[in-house]
Image (tube, rainbow, N blue to C red):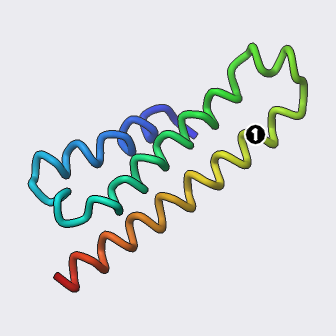
Amino acid sequence: MDIWFVIATLLAPVFAEYAKIRSKAERQFNFIAAAGVFFLVSIAFTASLFTNLVGASYIFGVYIFEFLGWLFLIVGAVWAVFSGLIK
């Protein structure tokens, strides 16, 4: 996971607000922003503090939060596309 991907995921709702399309899909963009937060937490688990204190068990935190991030991102993106097509 790269920090630039996290920044892009967190900026997607901001750009949607500028494009005036966030009001049409408020909850969907909240899901996308939550995915960015989950990705940020998964990157935080790879910091050297966690690897020194916890050892190899930090990998589960990375996997869990990265999985939740991808799940929220996919659900939010697909939901936003379908709600945009319906409206």
Is 56 left, or right, of 68 in this rendering? right
Q: In the rendered view, would you say 13 is above or below 82?
A: above
Dividing the picture into quadrants, the one containing residue 47 is top right
Identify the residue shown where x is 50% and y is 39%: 37
In the rendered view, would you say 65 is above or below 50?
A: below
Percent coordinates x, y for residue 74 in the rendering: 48, 65
- Residue located 73% across and 15% down the image: 48
Query: Left or right: where does residue 27 sit relative to residue 70?
Result: left
Query: Quarter holding the N terminus?
Result: top right
Describe the element under mark 1 as helix, strand or loop: helix
The residue lying toward the viewer, choosing from 67 and 33, is 33
Q: Position of residue 68 (x, y in %)?
A: 62, 54
The residue beneath circle 1 is 61
Count up the numbered dots.
1
Q: In which quadrant is the C terminus drawn?
A: bottom left
Name which residue type carries label 1: Gly
Q: Nearer the viewer, residue 13 or 3?
A: 13
Q: Is residue 81 left or right of residue 42?
A: left
Height in image: 64 above or below 44?
Answer: below
Return the residue found at the far bottom: 86
Quadrant of res 76? bottom left
Q: Quadrant of residue 53?
A: top right
Give the residue displayed 77% in from the left and 20% down from the top: 50
Number of other residues with Cα within 10 Å of mark 1, as a class: few under 14, some 14 to 19, many 20 or more: some
